[in-house]
Amino acid sequence: MVTTSTGRVSGLIEGGISSYLGIPYAAPPIGPAAFAAPAPAAAWEGVRPASEYGPTAPQVGYPAPIAALLDNVIVPGDDYLNLNIWTPDPGAGGLPVMVWIHGGAFTRGSNRIEMYAGDTFARDGVVCVGINYRLGTAGFASIDGAPENRGLLDQLAALRWVRDNIAAFGGDPDAITVFGESAGAMSVASLLASPRATGLFARAIMQSGNGSAAADPRDARTITARMAAILGVGATAEAFGAIGAADLLSAQSQVALELMVNPDPALWGESVISVGMGIMSQFPVVDGEVLTAVPHEAIAAGAGAEVPLVAGWNADEFRFFMVATGGAAAVTEDTAAAILGRGPGGPEYLRARLADGASPGDAVSEALTMRGFSLPTTAIARSRPAGSTHLYEFGHQSPQADIRAGHAVEIPFVFDHLADAHPLVGPEPDQRLADAMHRAWVDFATTGDPGWTTYQNSSDIKHFD
């Protein structure tokens, strides 16, 4: 039993690891609070059982080809601003802490997916925390009458809760490492950039993200306006708050499909198209408070410079989105040229890859991997103080659906939960690679050194193959 700032909780002990699941860190975002900043969780009397995962944020499931590779548990419930904690010893003191922010394009995911369980980190001496936050329209729609970046405000509230309570679980509030993948990594970049996050964590890890995921609020409101038109209501927090979750999700999905089919900047705004890359329709905005600039710009100007960072990408990120869904097979030379346009990975790259025998779909996947992941991640490292950033590339190839080293394949290796990720990594994943990668994350959280040199040039990038 552990005493927190809002009451006592009882967890479970299994294999020497104590787990405390589904603890609310903020009040349920329902009713008038649906589009408000997070409020403190209400205190409770007695002992609250914390032996089962809590609800997840409202969302729809992945489309079938993605769902076959990456499981996503959806459990409705009001108290979804919750967190899970795994600790080797709640009676200990000064243990390093890792806080996981899940991905899912800011519209999907939760802290209760089995391969995200933090028991393996606790096994190795780290207190591990997994958090939920508001997703999609509730978390990120730019809407009149509501604070911007509510999903990021939830993350900040969770980090404050961890800072104030983690010592009761054996952790050191001054040794918190925040880590995340995909939208979770983009969230980490936002937290590095945000003046609101100063002092809430000591180290950071970005897996398969970038620092570009923040739109102009004026562009983001084109999404909100289209949703309002579909729903037949005003584009206000009050009007949206009166709509049921199922109808909001239906409108959100319709707009996401419209944007994907017709990604016209004249319709949606340049920043929405450039940030979303046809995959995301809702994400953080530059609001002048939580985010004073696009994260990579703030980081280049010195934000988060004191925080050591590990950042990296998977060698074949976009195969997860294009090959697994069959989209790559439909790409012709003409459509490839239209998709890539000018810039890095543009006409010259396309011509060279086609001359080498690559298919148009493969060339597009490679170019978008560069644009969305490897180039912007390397740019962040170059913009930060020397000696502060470690870069990696994950190259281990999954045999599943020809995704190779696609998006999300590294996650079960980081968590050392290969058995819980069979559809993603195949029947015979490399345990030695999981041992090495998991150990690097533990060492970084414990000492600040993942085991390879900080980035100065391409020879300093660690390759996990």
Image: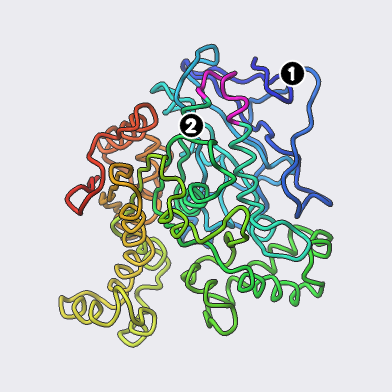
Measured as percent of width and height from the top left, residue 134 is found at 65, 50
For the residue pair 18 and 199, the one nearer the viewer reads as 199
Mark 2 highlights which residue? 176
Q: Is residue 234 left or right of residue 140?
A: right
Toward the viewer: 17 or 205?
205
Q: Main secondary structure of the magenta part?
A: helix
Task: Using residue 300 as the reference point, say whether residue 362 is left or right of it.
Answer: left
Q: Residue furthest front?
A: 301
- The crowd level at tag 2 (other Cα within 10 Å; few <14, some 14-19, many 20+) is many
Q: Give the Cα distance between marks 1 and 2.
A: 27 Å
Q: Provide the residue span drawn in magenta.
A: 162-172
- Where is residue 308 drawn, in percent x and y? 38, 39
Number of labels in the image equals 2
N-terminal label among 1 and 2: 1
Asked which colour scheme the image uses, the reply is: rainbow
127 lies left or right of 4: left
| Residue 168 is covered by the magenta coloring | yes
Q: Residue 190 versus residue 107: which sits nearer the camera? A: 190
Residue 115 % position (x, y): 46, 39
Which residue is situated farthest in the top direction here?
91
Picture coordinates of residue 417 (x, y %)? 40, 36
Is there CB contact under 8 Å for labels 1 and 2? no
The residue positioned 28% from the left and 46% from the top of the image is 386
For the residue labelled by badge 2, is the local secondary structure a helix, a strand or a loop?
Answer: strand
Q: Quadrant of the N terminus?
A: top right
- The amino acid type, in three-letter code, at marker 2 is Ile
152 or 9: nearer the viewer:
152
Give the labeled residue for mark 1: 47
Residue 224: within the magenta? no
